[in-house]
Image (cartoon, coloured by chain):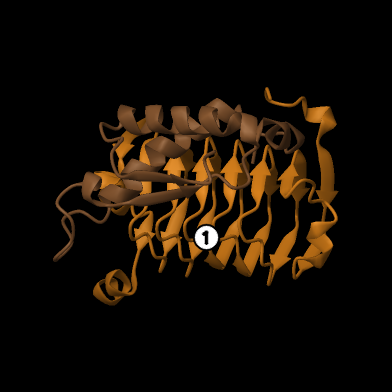
Chain colours: A brown, B orange
Amino acid sequence: MGSEILLKQNSPYTLQEMAYNMGESIVKQKEKFCGLEQGPESSENVLHIMDLAYVPSNEKTIVKEYCLKGAEKELSSEGIKFLNDK
Amino acid sequence: MENPEEDIYLKIRNKTFVDETALNQYVKWNALSIINFVDCRFKEIDFLGRSINFCKFKNSEFNDSSFRKCQFSKCNFENCQIVKLDITKAEFRNCNFRNCEFLQSDLSATDFWECQFVETTFKHSNLNFIIVQDVKVWKSNEWIEIKDESNFEKILKDMNLISTDEDEMENS
């Protein structure tokens, strides 16, 4: 998904905002696994895989950059792997 | 996009959507957007992973449907009955719920970001692993601000907005 599709969908969010929100959300989702019996100690020990296959080539870097910014806001940008990011 | 003017909303009134076929005619680019549904019924809909932007649902019923992994942005729900709905791993951002009832619905791993709840109840519904961020719940005459999910269920339970089978056993 790229900025053109978001516009066509009447999304209230820009591509940057959407990617940033995803980054924030990813960290919070990963934290849900922490503290479970035999679970990981921190969210950085949980790998989240994000497939950028459907992001237009010229926007993959933007999505990666803003996703990591969102994750950093939640104090953890480690443990996020991007696929098809070139 | 900015909040759309009221007059550009497509208005759909008193319609029953059974399975997703009828609803799909309003889907563009894998999204439902800027639609005002009033007195509508949604039954046995499978709407996996769709985006739902700037939609309003008023006096409407959702039954036996799946909105799993849907992304709801800037949507309003008012006087809605939400029964046996699979909304696992869905995302609600800047959405408002007023006088709604979730009954026997599965909301596990669903995100609520900057949403507002007024007189909205969750009965026999699964709220495991939900994410809550900057949510407001209306209590009597003031907003209760909830920063994260750690006390969301407790606050709603204290306000009798959440009930489980066990609660009803205790009260009977």
Q: Is residue A40 above or below residue A15?
A: below
Q: Position of residue B1 (x, y in %)?
A: 69, 25
In the image, is A17 to the left or to the right of B110? right
Q: Is residue B166 above or below residue A31?
A: below
Q: Which residue is mark 1?
A: B87
- x, y percentage for residue B52? 66, 46
The answer to which quarter of the image holds residue B16 is: bottom right
Assign the C terminus of chain A to one quadrant of the image.
top right
Q: Residue B80: name its quadrant.
A: bottom right
> What residue sits 18% from the left and 61% below the top?
A39
The correct choice, above or below, for A16 with respect to B68 in the image is above
User: Horizontally, is A63 left or right of B137 in the view?
Assistant: right
Q: Which residue is at a point 61% across and 51% down the rendered structure image?
A: B79
Q: Residue at x 14, y 65 (%)?
A: A38
Does any portion of residue A36 appear in the rendered image?
Answer: yes
Q: Position of residue A26 (x, y in %)?
A: 38, 44
User: Could you classify mark 1 by the number of other residues whose Cα lies within 10 Å: few (under 14), some (14-19), or many (20 or more)?
Assistant: many
Task: Provide the chain ID for the residue under circle 1.
Answer: B
Query: From this viewpoint, is residue B137 visible?
Result: no
Please tell me which residue lies in front, A69 or A59: A59
Residue in the foreground of this view, choosing between A49 and B158: A49
Q: Residue furthest top?
A: B2
Report whether B150 appears left or right of B31.
Answer: left
Left/right placement of residue A76 relative to residue B32 reads left
Please state which of residues B125 and A60 is positioned toward the viewer in this rendering.
A60
Residue type marked 1: Ile
Residue at (65, 35) in percent of width and height? A2
